[in-house]
Amino acid sequence: MDTNTGRRVAGSRCIALVGPYLSGKTTLLEAILFRTGAIPRHGRGADKSTIGDASPEARAHGMSVELNAATTTYLGDSYTFLDCPGSIEFAQEARAALIGCDAAIVVCEADDKKAPALQLILKQLDEIDIPRILFINKIDKTESSPRDVLTWLQPASSRPLVLRQLPILTNGIVTGFIDLALERAFVYREHAESQVIDIPADLAEIEKSERFAMLEKLADHDDALMENLLSDLEPPRDQVFADLSRELAEGLITPVLFGSAEHGNGIGRLLKALRHEAPGVAETVKRLGLKANGGTVAQVLKTYHTAHGGKLSLARILQGEAADGTVFYGGRGQDARCAGLFALMGQTPNKLAKAAAGDTVALGRLEAIATGETIASAKGSTAQLARVARAPGVYGLALSVSDRKDEVKLTSAIAKLVEEDPSLALDHNTDTHEMVLWGQGEMHLRVAIERLEGKFGVHARSRPRRIAYKETIRKSTQVRGRHKKQSGGHGQFGDIVVEIGPLARGTGFVFSDTISGGVVPKQYIPAVETGVREWMAQGPLGFPVVDFSVNLSDGSYHDVDSSEMAFKTAARIAMTEGIPQCSSVLLEPIVAVEIHVPSDATSRVNQIVTGHRGQLLGFDGRDGWPGWDTVKAHMPESEIGSLIIELRSATAGVGTFTYVHDHMAELVGRAAEQVIASRKAEAA
């Protein structure tokens, strides 16, 4: 029991560090680990000495590209912090991990230009109803007051922001803070505990006003506290802390703290807030709706494939205990025996004997278990606690290997990449005969391809994916296809007359026959259709032919020399001779696109769409997203290859889109000539 607050302190906690790109999450993790004694020195991203972002790809690009976990202790309690990437391209890393967390620390800056990026993060937290504390980082580099920052932050948050601290300024620089709940003042010391001082006289009245504002927000959900305020009675301190803890856990408020992770300022106050106010595993189990069943239940947060340890599944133990050899069952009935338990310190696993409820550990070699699964030691005892929505791919590259023997190795390596990062997807496109890797942006796929080579030893060549163009006809014709061959013994004879005509867009292919008098025996008619279907895979322009009809109207046969093969060949001859008479035209796929962007970027996005031969259908406010618009348009699929790159550039990295195939449309002129010439060059 904590003597200051009267609150029972929970055991092992799992805390996510989330926030926009470059907000300082990895630096904050480093500061926490240093303050709690988990590491001997405070590493720096600049010299590539941090516990997080230790992978070759993260250090090469100077950014977080995957979730990093680190376990430490503070005042006797165990904490596992999950440092989640801030870039929207790697947002899937957080989606599965957040499900098993007790709370999230949302790291942000006093920069209103990053409000849309912050809103993306907060929306993600809203979807799974996870408690959060907002930490305004880099307080030493801003001239804005926390109260001003809250003014532009609040519209991004669905929950009331409650300021917990008042800054102390010396010559315009934040040198300390007043804790509004404790009513104590502190001055910062570099990478050390803050020192208690008297509340500065010039801040006494401001402190009273800000504390009352904090209590008013707490009182919105506590009638007893409201009565105290209305009666001008000072509420008991333990009541204030109890309200802060309860209202945070129930998602009624978002407390706001500030500091500087780079200098270690505000870290102790943040850790104490976590210890005294953040919920523990008991509240998380209740939030997830897990029913006690006597066995062990865990939620898989992330999958890693290591060079020497094989597959590791980072999991939160929600109920029971786990040890080496524990057999877990997944939601699909598959089972796997755990081969070792480890606490992670970045990329370093430390062996454990066992894990209890609340612990976040890496379980070895659960080969049949995927990221996001709920696993249990009793078969069929626990349903999936939460479903992780996978973001659809917005950027695709065709992959190939120089030696066809390496294709199996490539697909095996990609399967492991997809296990680690479910927002990647591999598509074997039957129309273009390509292997296409889909991801969330250019950097996302660049990192994936680097991992293929660096981690799995597969050198994959990448190039822009092909578009599934097709061709059709504009005119009708009638043509005879005659195949006659004599080569000793039985010859080959097939003779048909077909009528070829165009059909409405999207109809496909229709075959019919109006044979009378048995001029083409019934057993040979299906062979004619088969011959046409085989031919239509590549028309005179080099693409599959669609939206046309073929009617078999006449023909002749030979009692001895006719066969199915002969009539198939006759059909191909008829198509080869007839289609060039029908005015072939190229068709390109048109997709229906929905683009989600901050409202101040809508006009720029409209220009981007029209610049890509798109047809604007209109825009409206994005449902549930204040300050955002959804732009709807029809665009050629060939034009969306680089769309995500331009969108991110125009929206400070937060714009995105979804699309579905809508229809095929004629492509003429120079654009069509270029496509046809490119196909002929490939064929050559």
Image (cartoon, rainbow, N blue to C red):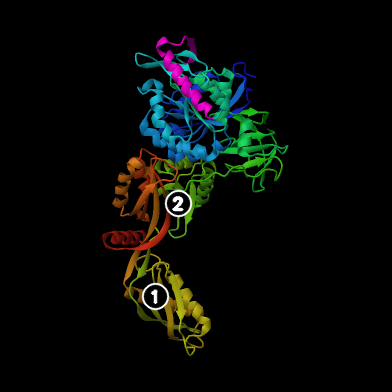
Q: Position of residue 93 (x, y in %)?
A: 50, 38
Number of residues whose C-alpha sits closer than 10 Å to that of mark 1, classed few (under 14), some (14–19) or many (20 or more) = many
Return the mark for residue 436.
2
Q: Amino acid at mark 1?
A: Met
The span picked out in magenta is 191-220
Of callouts 2 and 1, the N-terminal one: 2
Q: Is residue 116 left or right of residue 356?
A: left
- Amino acid type, mark 2: Val
The x, y position of residue 537, in whole percent, is: 43, 67
Front position in the image: 229 or 292: 229
- State which quadrant residue 330 falls in: top right
Front residue of 578/106: it is: 106
Q: Is residue 368 left or right of residue 557?
A: right
Residue 529: x percent and y percent? Answer: 47, 76
**Residue 46, placed above or below residue 626:** above
Q: Secondary structure at mark 2?
A: strand
Magenta span includes 194: yes
Who is closer to the viewer here, 277 or 181? Answer: 181
Q: Main secondary structure of the magenta part?
A: helix
Q: Is residue 414 above or below residue 10?
A: below
Task: Please give the name of the residue rendered at 71% of the width and 44% of the height, measured from the top-left corner.
Answer: 379
Mark 1: secondary structure: helix
- Which quadrant would the C terminus be assigned to in this image? bottom left
Contact? badges 2 and 1 (CB < 8 Å): no
Count how many numbered circles sit on residues in the image: 2
Q: Which residue is mark 1?
A: 575
Residue at 38%, 26% in the rendered image: 148
Membership of 306 in magenta stretch: no
Q: Residue furthest front?
A: 231
